[in-house]
Structures are given as structure tokens and as C-alpha cells.
Image (spheres, rainbow, N blue to C red):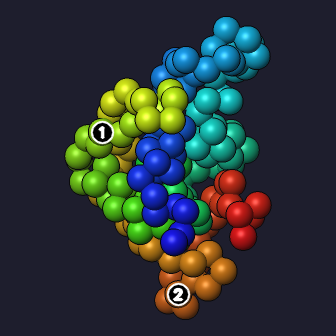
Amino acid sequence: MNPYEQDRVLHTYLLFHYGTREQILHGSPLESGVGAALSDDHFRFPVATVADTFHLADAPFERALDLGCAVGRSSFELSRHAREVIGIDYSHAFIEAAEALRDGQTLSYHRYSEAQLWDVLLAAAPAEARPQAIQFEVGDAQHLRHDLGAFDLVHAANLLCRL
């Protein structure tokens, strides 16, 4: 089974993509140690990778591709800067979650503190996003469909190390 189809992995990705710094560090030994010294961007990776790109670019873009989009957080950020965004991930579970968020749903997920202990948190699409500009689909980054067309920007953060 693809590990990215497991609920625990989905919940972890929802936490790291939509959770706050406090939610991510809660109960961790890093909460008052090294984690306290890290900048907020360390806890906002899916947002920061897009924001850093647009500090260097003259936006807006026509089309952006978020390859390896996971649960869609970077795609939502890209929608602020591109007229059309396509987010592609290999995981059906991740794409289903991203589509639910795009469609206005709030998703509950578990933040695990020990093996079988968890808190329930909520994920929602960011208010600044333009969900109508985003299309999500399941796909293989190494074998993209041929009719995707051209893109002005390709975001592939945290993908190459997993291929």
C-alpha cells in the first residue's frame, strides 16, 4: 500500500500544511527548545516556498503547476498569484482532502501526541485564496498527462527527494 494513502500520514500533512506554529510544536520537546528559536517560515513551508518565489517574480502568472501538491496548501497560495492553478499529487487521499478544502469544507484531523493519543484540529482553505482558480488531480510526477499544456511557473517543493 502507498504510505501516502494512510490516515495517519494524511493527518500529519494536514497539520504541517494548515496548522499553526503552536499546533505543530504542541507537546514536542522542540516547543521550548530549538523550535522556539526558529522563524515562523520554518512552520509555514508550503506558504513560504510560494511567497519566496513571488518576491523574485513579476506576477501575476497565467498558469501555475503545483507538482506534488500534497494536501493543497501551496496551490491555495499560488491561486493568489496565478489565474489558473493545477495541483497534482500521487496520493488519492491527499487530493480528496485538497478538493474538499477547495470546495469550502473544513476538515478535522488528528495531531498525534503519542502512539494512540491525539487531539482533533481543523483545516480550512485560507481566506485569501481563490479556490475557483484551482483544479486538483491525481497524477504521477514522472509521467504527466500530455495535454496539460504550458505553465508560467512550476512549484515542486519537497518533491524531488521523494521520486
Quarter location, residue 39: top right
User: Relative to residue 19, is residue 69 depicted above or below?
Assistant: below
Q: Residues within 10 Å of mark 2 (few under 14, many from 20)?
A: few
User: Relative to residue 118, is residue 155 depicted above or below?
Assistant: below
Query: Dot 1 corresponds to which residue?
Result: 108
In the orientation shown, which residue stands out farthest toward the bottom?
146
User: Relative to residue 76, is residue 110 depicted above or below?
Assistant: above
**Which is nearer the eye, 109 or 81?**
109
Pinpoint residue 98: horizontal percent, then vertical percent.
38, 55
**Which residue: 59% across, 33% down?**
44
Q: Which mark is residue 145?
A: 2
**Which residue: 28% across, 54% down?**
100
Pinpoint residue 139: horizontal percent, then vertical percent.
51, 77
Which image quarter holds the C terminus?
bottom right
Label 2 vs label 1, nearer the camera? 1
Q: Residues within 10 Å of mark 1 (few under 14, many from 20)?
A: some
Pinpoint residue 136: horizontal percent, then vertical percent.
40, 66
**Which is nearer the eye, 123 or 86?**
123
Q: Callout 1, which amino acid?
A: Ser
Mark 2 to mark 1 CA distance (whole Å) = 32 Å
Marks 2 and 1 close (CB-CB < 8 Å) = no
Q: Callout 2, which amino acid?
A: Arg
Q: Secondary structure at mark 1?
A: strand
> Which callout, 2 or 1, points at the residue further toward the start of the chain?
1
Q: Which mark is residue 21?
A: none
**Which residue: 67% across, 54% down?**
157
Pinpoint residue 101: horizontal percent, then vertical percent.
31, 49
